[in-house]
Image (spheres, rainbow, N blue to C red):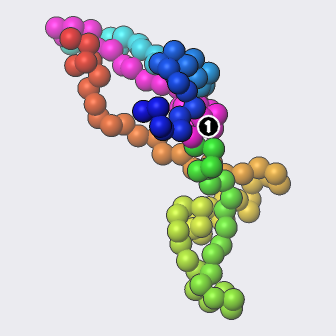
């Protein structure tokens, strides 16, 4: 391990560097009152999507992987055939970018759930 070019030399230094990383969004919870009795309370857990997006933007590992510019890519100089490499190179992103105020940009975000029942983790 000593031969590896690591930015730390001890577990204490590694922990110190980890403490400097930005913190992630906080989990929130809310008891959901149901019209039918349940064995245990129904609790909804979630993170604020705006906090999640801010966390991603502030995370150093994602810095070089942000794609914020709608663009058209063509396969030839004559611009006869479009090449689509992702959402930001698609027609919808281009059309939306053209109608928002000058200086603004699009931010494509996928809101999803991994369908993990986190209440099962609280055994």
Q: Is residue 113 left or right of residue 22?
A: left
Residue at image coords 74%, 59%: 99
Circle 1 crowding by C-alpha within 10 Å: few under 14, some 14–19, many from 20: few
- Circle 1 — which element? helix
Question: How many numbered badges does the structure rendering display?
Answer: 1
Q: Is residue 63 above or below residue 83?
A: above
Q: Per the image, is 112 magenta?
A: no
Q: Which residues are magenta?
A: 37-61
Q: Is residue 46 left or right of residue 108?
A: left
- The quadrant the C terminus occupies is top left
Q: Is residue 119 above or below residue 71?
A: above
Residue 25 visible in rendering: no
Residue situated furthest right in the rendering: 102
Quarter of the image where one finds residue 50: top right
Residue at image coords 53%, 34%: 6
The picture places residue 17, in percent across and down from the top left corner, at 58, 23
The picture places residue 121, in percent across and down from the top left corner, at 25, 18
Residue at image coords 72%, 51%: 105
Quarter of the image where one finds residue 61: top right
Q: Per the image, is 56 magenta?
A: yes
Viewer-closest of 91 and 26: 26
Residue situated furthest left in the rendering: 39
Quarter of the image where one finds residue 1: top left
Q: Is residue 70 left or right of residue 41?
A: right
Residue at image coords 54%, 45%: 109
The picture places residue 47, in percent across and down from the top left corner, at 48, 25
Disc 1 target residue: 60
Viewer-closest of 14 and 18: 14
The picture places residue 46, in percent across and down from the top left corner, at 43, 23
């Amino acid at each position: 391990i000593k031969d590896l070019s690591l930015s730390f030399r001890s577990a204490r230094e590694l922990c110190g560097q980890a403490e400097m990383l930005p913190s992630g969004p906080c989990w929130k919870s809310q008891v959901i009152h149901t019209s039918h009795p349940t064995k245990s309370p129904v609790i909804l857990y979630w993170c604020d999507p705006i906090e999640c997006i801010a966390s991603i933007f502030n995370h150093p590992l994602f810095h070089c992987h942000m794609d914020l510019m709608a663009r058209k890519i063509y396969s030839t100089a004559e611009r006869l055939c479009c090449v689509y490499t992702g959402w930001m190179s698609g027609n919808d992103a281009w059309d939306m970018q053209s109608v928002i105020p000058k200086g603004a940009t699009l931010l494509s975000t996928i809101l999803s759930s991994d369908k993990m029942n986190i209440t099962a983790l609280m055994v």
